[in-house]
Amino acid sequence: MKGGGVIGIGVDIIEIRRMREALECWGTRFRDRVFAPVEWRYCESRPAPWRHYAARFALKEAVAKAFGTGIGAEIGWLDIETLRTESGAPVVKLVGRARAMAARRGVNRILASLAHGHEYAIAQAILIGKESSI
């Protein structure tokens, strides 16, 4: 692959109902522990914000799975942010521990895709680096 190889792939699916319940039960306490201000400002600007939160939650999980760690001691919720291009395509921004891990592993790009319907949100992340590790 010109410009780099696949370092990791992750996917996640979430029931939107569960995200809505978490937001209703825990409110801003949950939101602020899982989502960066740029993410929650976007989600709250949309109709049915829980759908957008669910998609971003799934993308954070997918990125962490692509690293092979999951969310936990090595990568936290706020170490992965979902931004958007002008066209609306998702862009992953790594900060903190995730950014440091990406540098150690030679990740120089993350391809991301997310989708949501009425019941489920799904996301996929592909880590691209200088050379393939699979």
Image: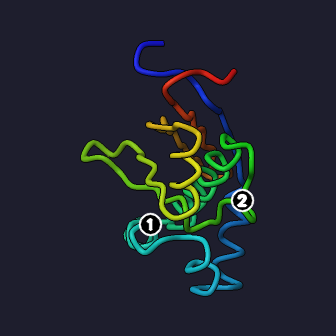
The tag earlier along the polypeptide, 1 or 2, is 1
The quarter of the picture where residue 41 lies is bottom left
Q: Residue at x 62, y 87 (%)?
A: 29
Q: Return the residue nearer the eye: 44 or 97.
A: 97
Please report the residue visible at 58 percent of the width from the left and 47 percent of the height from the top. 117
Residue plotted at (59% across, 40% down): 105
Q: Nearer the viewer, residue 120 or 131?
A: 131
Please say if 42 is above or below 6. below
Residue labelled with disc 1: 39
In three-dimensional space, the C-alpha distance between marks 1 and 2, rounded to whole angstroms, equals 18 Å
Nearer mark to the viewer, of 1 and 2? 2
SS of the residue at dot 2? loop
Residue at the top extreme?
1
Which of these two is toward me, 100 or 118?
Answer: 100
* Residue type for callout 2: Ile
Count the marks: how many?
2
Q: Is residue 24 left or right of residue 42?
A: right
* Residue with the mark numbered 2: 71
Q: Quadrant of the C terminus?
A: top right
Q: Measured along the vertical axis of the image, is residue 118 above or below residue 66?
A: below
The color scheme shown is rainbow
